[in-house]
């Protein structure tokens, strides 16, 4: 699964009201307590806090509102006025806000309106990165030139208009910490946690800033800020359950009993369990002349809750002459752990998968997030063996496109199919024409593009649980865009996206079916 999401749950009634009204911008982006993985709010922020900025309603040279005129005239109030700051208790309520865009090359804080300034470390704070933990590399931070081309492509910036909710704002917050001008505090955590890690910014960046890599390491730094309960839940889920198939099976087996006790949001997302007492075949022989042997990554969530996708993948590959092996020693790919600040766990899982797939000529993946993560495992581990492994990872639809579809393609089982581009397929693996080309070979099938189809659906790993307001805004926009196409089916190549889109379509009363593209190919054979 892709995409990663941190904590810092947004709890703002005004934000929810604006969302319910269908507004394009949600208002402010801030912190809040996250029961699954968040830092508690943005209050009491020190170090990298941007104070006194009210969020982009006033532009240079333009008319001021009455409130902004009064604020400009009076300046900061209260005990903190003598220091040019803002009262901590006021900051806790309002959250960090930065409105104007940074000018290229301008230092962090230069965009703040009158009466506000950037404050450095406060007495008693500990600026800089936490020692003995992964942190964004200085060379990576230096690649950003503050051009701002990424801003209109960032989902959180597009919805909030907040500089702190943009890639540039987040990178500048990282720079402040790296330079010793700020510390890893709850404000910093709220900036990082609001990011979807969709990596749309990387797709348009002329400087090729490795934003995803920096975000993963920044989230390692904020892990100690999370509550004990949050750390326990994340440890049980990401470190204990997902990597162990027996525990994952137990979780699925207990799903009917646990359903009444979980939140309504989780119930709306988690699909029914599938094939609880059956395993995938260890080896599947090809039909006709053998073209080669491939190994399938069965995955964790994909195999337990989306087993039909794995079975469809095996059948389609076998029909096209490929012998399919499912290595028993494989484990969860570690994408969710990496995206949520648990790089130590992600590295451990990557090393186990390297051993499990050591003999494979090609590793076939049918989940966009897993494929993107495993394709970059060389960067994660930093070894030649890992880089060689990453080069063997192939998305199933891209593999069929590149190697050629040998089996005759019968008539399509569906008329009109809308194709959803998962972020980690489109942005990281650069997969757009390949799956469409394979589906185009089905006679009678029409592929329709989703309006603004390159925008994130809001799933992003755990994001739709930890940041529900922002995720719901993105989910509703995606569902309405899909429904507007008049498609019978929407193709989704990532389990997280599939769960999110299904929930969104149900919420607007749509009956559009959500299938993996390889399932569409499989059903064309009458399966």
Image: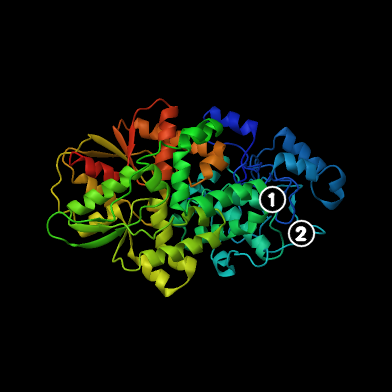
Mark 1, other Cα within 10 Å: few <14 / some 14–19 / many ≥20: many
Could you say which quadrant of the image residue 17 lies in? Answer: top right
> In front of the other: label 2 or label 1?
1
Residue 497 falls left or right of residue 191: left
Q: Quadrant of the C terminus?
A: top left
Residue bearing mark 1:
186
**Residue 404: percent from left, percent from top:** 19, 56
**Residue 309: percent from left, percent from top:** 31, 45
Who is closer to the viewer here, 282 or 81?
A: 282
| Mark pair 2, 1: CA separation | 14 Å
Who is closer to the viewer here, 393 or 82?
A: 393
Mark 2, other Cα within 10 Å: few <14 / some 14–19 / many ≥20: many
Q: Secondary structure at mark 2?
A: loop
Who is closer to the viewer here, 405 or 177?
A: 405
Colour mode of the rendering: rainbow
For the question of whether residue 17 can be seen, the reply is yes
């Amino acid at each position: 699964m892709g995409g990663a999401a941190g904590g810092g749950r947004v709890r703002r009634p005004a934000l929810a009201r604006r969302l319910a009204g269908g507004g394009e911008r949600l208002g402010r982006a801030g912190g809040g307590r996250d029961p699954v993985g968040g830092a508690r709010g943005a209050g009491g922020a020190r170090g990298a806090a941007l104070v006194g900025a009210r969020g982009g309603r006033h532009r240079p040279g333009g008319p001021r509102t009455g409130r902004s005129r009064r604020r400009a005239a009076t300046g900061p109030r209260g005990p903190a006025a003598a220091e040019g700051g803002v009262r901590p208790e006021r900051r806790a309520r309002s959250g960090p806000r930065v409105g104007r865009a940074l000018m290229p090359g301008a230092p962090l804080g230069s965009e703040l309106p009158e009466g506000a300034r950037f404050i450095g470390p406060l007495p008693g704070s500990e600026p800089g990165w936490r020692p003995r933990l992964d942190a964004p590399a200085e060379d990576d931070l230096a690649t950003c030139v503050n051009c701002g081309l990424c801003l209109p492509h960032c989902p959180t910036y597009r919805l909030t208009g907040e500089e702190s909710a943009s890639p540039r704002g987040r990178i500048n917050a990282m720079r402040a910490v790296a330079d010793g001008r700020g510390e890893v505090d709850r404000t910093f955590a709220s900036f990082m946690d609001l990011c979807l890690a969709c990596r749309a910014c990387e797709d348009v960046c002329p400087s090729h800033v490795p934003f995803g890599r920096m975000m993963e390491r920044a989230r390692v730094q904020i892990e100690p800020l999370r509550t004990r309960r949050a750390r326990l839940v994340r440890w049980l889920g990401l470190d204990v359950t997902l990597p162990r198939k027996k525990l994952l099976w137990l979780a699925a087996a207990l799903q009917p009993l646990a359903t009444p006790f979980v939140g309504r949001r989780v119930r709306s997302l988690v699909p029914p369990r599938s094939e609880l007492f059956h395993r995938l075949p260890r080896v599947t022989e090809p039909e006709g002349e053998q073209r080669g042997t491939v190994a399938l990554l069965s995955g964790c969530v994909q195999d337990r809750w989306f087993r039909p996708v794995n079975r469809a993948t095996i059948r389609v590959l076998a029909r096209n002459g490929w012998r399919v092996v499912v290595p028993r020693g494989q484990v969860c790919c570690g994408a969710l752990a990496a995206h949520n600040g648990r790089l130590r766990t992600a590295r451990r899982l990557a090393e186990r998968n390297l051993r499990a797939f050591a003999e494979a000529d090609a590793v076939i993946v049918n989940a966009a997030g897993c494929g993107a993560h495993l394709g970059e495992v060389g960067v994660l581990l930093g070894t030649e063996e890992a880089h060689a492994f990453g080069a063997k990872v192939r998305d199933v639809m891209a593999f069929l496109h590149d190697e050629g579809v040998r089996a005759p393609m019968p008539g399509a089982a569906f008329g009109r199919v809308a194709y959803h581009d998962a972020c980690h397929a489109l942005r990281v693996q650069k997969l757009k024409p390949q799956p469409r080309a394979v589906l185009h070979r089905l006679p009678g099938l029409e592929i329709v593009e989703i309006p603004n189809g390159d925008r994130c659906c809001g799933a992003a790993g755990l994001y739709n649980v930890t940041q529900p307001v922002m995720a719901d805004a993105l989910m509703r926009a995606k569902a309405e865009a899909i429904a507007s196409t008049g498609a019978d089916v929407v193709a989704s190549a990532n389990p997280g996206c599939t769960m999110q889109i299904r929930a969104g379509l149900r919420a607007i009363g749509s009956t559009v079916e959500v299938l993996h593209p390889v399932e569409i190919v499989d059903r064309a054979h009458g399966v």
